Image: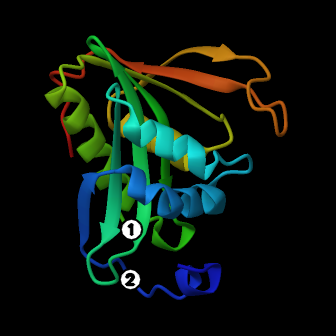
Amino acid sequence: MTAKETASVPAMHPLAFRKMTPDDADAVARVEAACFPVPWSRESFWREASNENTSYLLAIDEETKDVIGYAGCWILADEAQITNVAILPAYRGQGAGTRLMAASIEAARARGATAMTLEVRPSNTPALALYHHFGFKEAGRRKGYYSDNGEDAIIMWNTALATAPIS
């Protein structure tokens, strides 16, 4: 979907969620490039989708069949680390991120995760609100973490993943 097409999406269509496969790398890289100042490469997503220790879910617009977002995490033992959560700008503010995050938490739980962590920019107030909604708490900072502007990263944890509400 081009930037012009995403700018013209009138309202949220029904969404479906499914596991990312290596064949989805191009679509996910397009979402990534639209959402982040320093995007991961297509090859990175191909490798992530091929890794048995990852869980990547896609948000699919059921009407257009386009990938409109994704959430990824690494899962080792009982911990999951969110790598990225991204929703195309035209689909934001309509609940897509909340539904995608809920699906990602459920997928991590299904793989035995009882705790989840992530890093987020202090300036990303919508993401901070999303993570707080799901019970994440600030646990520290990584000074100068983001290479594009030297912004810190807030480290967040949810250590009660097994009992956290998913809605």
Q: Secondary structure at mark 2?
A: loop
Q: What residue would you read off at disc 1?
A: 94
Tag 2 or tag 1, which sits nearer the N-term?
2
- Give the class, few, some or many, for how many residues have Cα within 10 Å of label 2's Cα (few <14, many ≥20): few
Instruction: Pick whichever, 73 or 54, lies toward us.
Output: 54
Q: Secondary structure at mark 1?
A: loop
Q: What residue would you read off at disc 2?
A: 11
Residue 4 position, x and y percent, is 63, 86
The answer to whether 20 appears left or right of 151 in the picture is: left
- Give the class, few, some or many, for how many residues have Cα within 10 Å of label 1's Cα (few <14, many ≥20): few
Residue 106 position, x and y percent, is 20, 37
- The answer to whether residue 30 is above or below residue 1 is above
Point out which mark residue 16 bears: none
Residue 54 position, x and y percent, is 36, 31
Residue 81 position, x and y percent, is 42, 24
Identified by mark 1, the residue type is Gln
Instruction: Pick whichever, 112 or 43, lies toward us.
Output: 43
- The answer to whether residue 138 is above or below residue 122 is above
- The answer to whether residue 55 is above or below residue 17 is above
- Whole-number angstrom distance, CA of label 1 to CA of label 2: 8 Å
- The answer to whether residue 123 is above or below residue 54 is below
Quarter of the view holding residue 121: top right
Q: Are marks 1 and 2 in contact (CB under 8 Å)?
A: yes
Give the residue at x 66% y 51%.
36
Q: Residue furthest right?
A: 149
Quarter of the view holding residue 113: top left
